[in-house]
Amino acid sequence: MEKKDFKEVSIEELITYSKQKESPKITIIESITDEEFKYVDLISKRLFIEPIIVKNTNMIAFISDSSIVRKIAKDLNKKSQTMYYDFCKMPSGSITIYALTGYTKGWTIVRDNGYQVESFDENGEKCNAWLDTNINEVDTTYLNSLGFSEFTCTVQIGRKKCSNIEILEHSRLNYLNDGIYNDVRNCYYPAKNSNKDIAEYNKLEKLFKKWGFKSI
């Protein structure tokens, strides 16, 4: 499969980037075949996430969306590894003023648990790390320049932008719960007929009607 339209980043830059305190999570899927990449690309387009080719390897990386990526890896019977610095801070003053102006007098650290590595085997079960993160750190100017955010990058960086985040979040959750893909709506729906699933189905249909969308 032709991959020339995809970003390519070295494993060293990806790992170094994941060690920065305010970077979103990086998840890497172990080596995959060209045929398997077609599946990765298909799911990525449906869920508006973007694969990154790991230079000089057959591995695929994603920034943020770690639970979705681990589901993709499990479906392919592949190992995956998520890496991130568990850190969170908030404006020390009014959050409303910061949201409106981007200004704050200072920051309050809410959480600082250090660098985290979570590895999963072919069955999606936790395992020992299979990708070594003890590397000589490199410059991350390229990844930093892309402006990734832990909360918004998955909707903004894809080859196609999603016009309704609320519907997309429902689709992603249904995918994680082994939902059924509706190619007319370009959306995952619940797979079962329990009262909860029927309510979810009706919720999605109401959202499509509310926003006047035929699909996402």
Image (cartoon, rainbow, N blue to C red):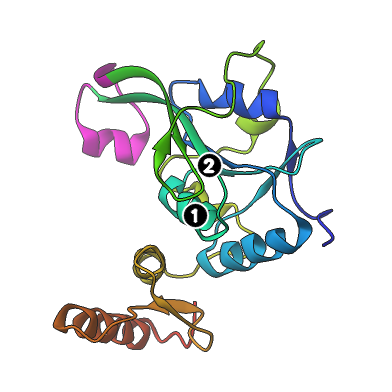
The residue stretch that appears in magenta: 92-111
- Is residue 95 on the magenta stretch? yes
Between residue 167 and residue 38, name the one nearer to us.
38
- SS at mark 1 in the image: helix
Q: Nearer the viewer, residue 80 or 24?
A: 80
**Which residue is found at the position 28% from the left and 84% from the top?**
201
Point out residue 65 in the picture as x, y percentages from the top left corner: 46, 49
Q: How busy is the neighbourhood of tag 1: few (under 14 within 10 Å), some, or many (20 plus)?
A: some
Specify the amino acid type for callout 1: Lys
**Residue 52 left/right relative to 187:** right
Q: Secondary structure at mark 2?
A: strand
Q: Pointer 1: what residue?
A: 74
Q: Are marks 2 and 1 in contact (CB under 8 Å)?
A: yes
Q: Which residue does the numbered mark 2 point to in the structure image?
A: 80
Query: Residue 68: x percent and y percent?
Result: 45, 54
Percent coordinates x, y for residue 207 in the rendering: 31, 80
Q: Is residue 46 above or below residue 111?
A: below
Q: Using residue 205 as the reference point, say whether residue 146 is left or right of it.
A: right
How far separated are the C-alphas under marks 2 and 1? 8 Å
Residue shown at the point (41%, 50%) measured from the top left: 67
Give the residue type that dot 2 points to. Ser
Asked which quadrant contains residue 194, the reply is bottom left
Residue at 26% from the left image edge and 25% from the top image edge: 91
Q: Residue furthest top?
A: 136
Image spot of residue 183 (x, y percent) = 53, 85
Q: Residue furthest left?
A: 195
Position above or below: 70 against 162: above
Mark 2 vs mark 1: which is more N-terminal?
Answer: 1
